[in-house]
Amino acid sequence: MTLLTNADDYDDEGFRTCSVTGLDIHHTAEGPVKLFGLTAVIAMLIGGIFAFTVAATRWEVIGLLGPDAFYRHLTLHAWNLLIFWLVFMEIAILYVGGPMVLGRRLPLTIAAKGGWVLMVLGALVVNVSVFLAGGFPDQNAPLLTGYVPLESPPAFYAGVVVFIVGAVVAALPFFLTLWRERREFPSKSLPLVAFGAFITSIIAFEALVGGLITFVYALLWRVDVLGSVDAAFYRQMYWTIGHGTQQINLAAMVTVWYFLTHVVGGAEVVSQKVSRTAFILYLFFINLGAAHHLMSDPVVSSGWRLFNTSYAFYGAAFASMIHAFAIPAGLEAGRRKRGKGGGLLGWLTSAPWSNPVFSATIFSIILFGFVGGITGVVMGQMQVNMTWHNNFATVGHFHGTVAVGTTLAFMGLVFFVIRTMFKRQLSFPRLASLQPYLYAGAMGITVLMMMYVGLLYGIPRRTVSIVQNIPGTNFDFAAASPLFAILGVFAILAIVAGAAFLVVAVASLLVGDRVTSPADNADLVPDGGAEDEGKPVHAYEMRGTFFFVLVFMAVFVVSYVANWWFLSELWSVGL
């Protein structure tokens, strides 16, 4: 199997026209998209293996691992699924949103290749060093945070630095693509997908530079160049990448939503200016959401906490609300325009739900909004954060954003790339159609159970044994056992659904039927009649979206009030 499509598909200048998107794609861009996408799937496989061992440990009926092994496995799960799987995919998204959408060659291909090599090398070093950690008294599994002065293997810090440098290098061709586009067409606006990718790249650059400062600092301390470290400074700097990478995920995921709902569902952009404004708000405010990790930090002032969790934080929340309306409204208007919008929800019920590209995208939008998005805003409040901080509810939140939000969107994108770039039909089509439903359902329930055990019982995170008791204390969490049983069962089912995605993806690449004509990908083209180009998008009803907005706001209000009630029920300490 070659990473490049058959050379006969390209013209003399190296371009081909995609029969689904209509984009003019140059082979210099298509090859790296495939390479980074494949590497991301491998990282997902590795992280998924450790997801099973972690879940089988936290579900104490199984109790698979002891403390030392558990922390190593938890670290490997976090770095491979929260960092490597997503960042490799996001570099691929930059190449799609840049040269592919703009119909340009990918410049600096040597940077794309060199960045990939550095990223792979860094990821390998991190994995090996963490897996071997614990064999020496001064080498501990760092978890995702790698907080100093906990001494982790020096190779771990070095591997992270190499990976970050590789990601910065790999992003350079994207920036050069946009620079050339602006020089050639100075008065032309970027397409919305390219604009979203551009905002994503700036957020990424900020996070990665912060990560370099953080881990170079820790590495210099670990190899005795620095005699000591300021742990408070490290914590502050760490969250520029620790949470910043998740904001890269958010911006990239929203960009994918706009792209796939348009290509597969026929969505229209309701307002270019409004959607672009929302992306710009992300640029200025989204990384301030990292403040909720520091609400209990003794070195942070009350004024800092209040500003970051209220006035500044509202800018990012407002931007997300804009996208939460604009994307489903665009889908509704687009489908009504194509004659697929009968009644209040006919535009949605008649959609191509058997297409895994579409269903994965829509489930990503729904679950991220109702689970990850609402909880992110609620736990980002200074007072309510006390009921979330450092317990299992926090784990539920970021699984609600990353595992069911970003990962589902990226799964849909991988299926799309297999069909349109690798030109392979999906193997096991029935399983492929069911996979987003299985994953969304199982992981959604898992996330809710994580939140429930954290909020209702205060179950701590990052501990091996908690249901029976915490050694050295009188606390008893046995009442949480039923919820943990549900959590364990559905966590295993979610991992099985993730494995089904990998099976379909790998089998499609290796033995899937070749796509030989546009008819083979006809199901990726929006259904419905011919578009009425003379009628503006605002002329079509969007009352179905308005209905969902009302439901969303009701759920938000209930969640907000419930969390304040949980806060009022906290134990009195020292009385």
Image (cartoon, grey):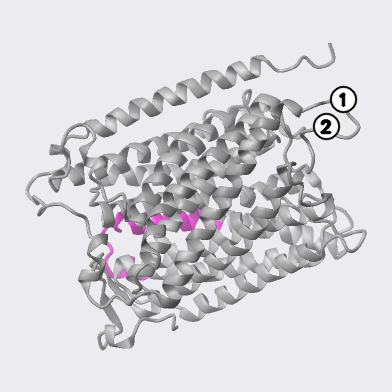
Residue type indicated by callout 1: Asn
Left or right position of 93 against 465: left
Residue position marked by numbered label 2 in the rendering: 469
Magenta residues span: 179-205
Q: Quadrant of the C terminus?
A: top right
**Residue 434 visible at all:** yes
The residue located at (47%, 38%) in the rendering is: 316
Mark 2 Cα within 10 Å, few/some/many (few <14, many 20+)? few
Residue 284: image tag: none
Q: Earlier in the sequence, mark 1 or mark 2?
A: 2
Element type at mark 2: loop
Question: Is-magenta flag for residue 155?
Answer: no
The image shows residue 151, relative to residue 422, as above or below, that is above
Residue type indicated by callout 2: Asn
Residue 26: image quadrant is bottom left
Q: Separation of disc 1 and disc 2 at Cα?
A: 7 Å
Where residue 6 appears, as percent x and y from the top left, is 34, 85
Residue position marked by numbered label 1 in the rendering: 474
The residue located at (48%, 70%) in the rendering is: 506
